[in-house]
Amino acid sequence: MSCLHGGTHNRQAMTHLKPGDKAPDFQGKDQDGKHISLNDYKGHKLVIYFYPKDNTPGCTAQACNLRDNYDLLLQNGYKVLGVSADSENSHRKFIEKHKLPFPLIADTDKEILKAYGVWGPKKFMGREFPGIHRTTFVIGEDSRIAEVIDQVKTKDHTSQIVGDCG
């Protein structure tokens, strides 16, 4: 059953990527130091979600929503991969604490974040600083972007991904 519905949730997205674009190739290390690349997911639908920081309220809610609905995502043919600038050790602790069933890439040099256009200026309490813009990309079996979700509902993220399929 294919449930890639295409589209973007907010046309004001920070990222330059849009549905139909070829997903930028990436290579990184997960929480266990294992190398992961886009090529590892060829022939599969991939949900790659970028989030600001391990163990913060919004990021924990988002990761736990994906964890709680992981079987539904798998049933709909999706693999899940999280990316932030946190270290492998931070990711390992986050995964253990919340029993996350999917890998997290430690993009400490921010190369993947920049390739996907999710690293940039953010505003908080009137102050501007560089950071990660919470964004999810749904990538099709052909390595093309099917959907960009930049208005992420952290507590209901899975429904944004699977839509009416679930």
Image (tube, grey):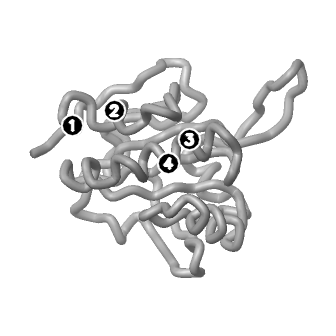
Q: CA distance from mark 4 to mark 2?
A: 13 Å
- Disc count in the image? 4
Instruction: In the displayed orientation, state which residue is furthest to the right.
Output: 127
User: Closest to the observer: 115 or 30?
Assistant: 30
The residue at the point 70 percent across, 66 percent down is 90
- Is 147 rendered above or below residue 70? above
Q: Secondary structure at mark 1?
A: loop
Separation of marks 1 and 3 at Cα, in angstroms: 19 Å
Q: Is residue 149 left or right of residue 161?
A: right
- Which quarter of the rendered picture does the C terminus lie within? top left
Separation of marks 4 and 1 at Cα, in angstroms? 17 Å
The tag earlier along the polypeptide, 1 or 3, is 3
For mark 3, what is the residue? 61
Q: Is residue 112 left or right of residue 90?
A: left
Q: Is residue 142 among what the camera can see?
A: no
**Looking at the image, which residue is at 64% across and 54% down?**
84
Dot 1 crowding, Cα within 10 Å, few <14, some 14–19, many 20+: few
**Are dots 4 and 3 in contact, CB under 8 Å?**
yes
Q: Earlier in the sequence, mark 4 or mark 1?
A: 4
Query: Which kind of residue does numbered mark 3 sit on?
Result: Ala
Please tell me whether mark 4 or mark 2 is closer to you in this view: 4
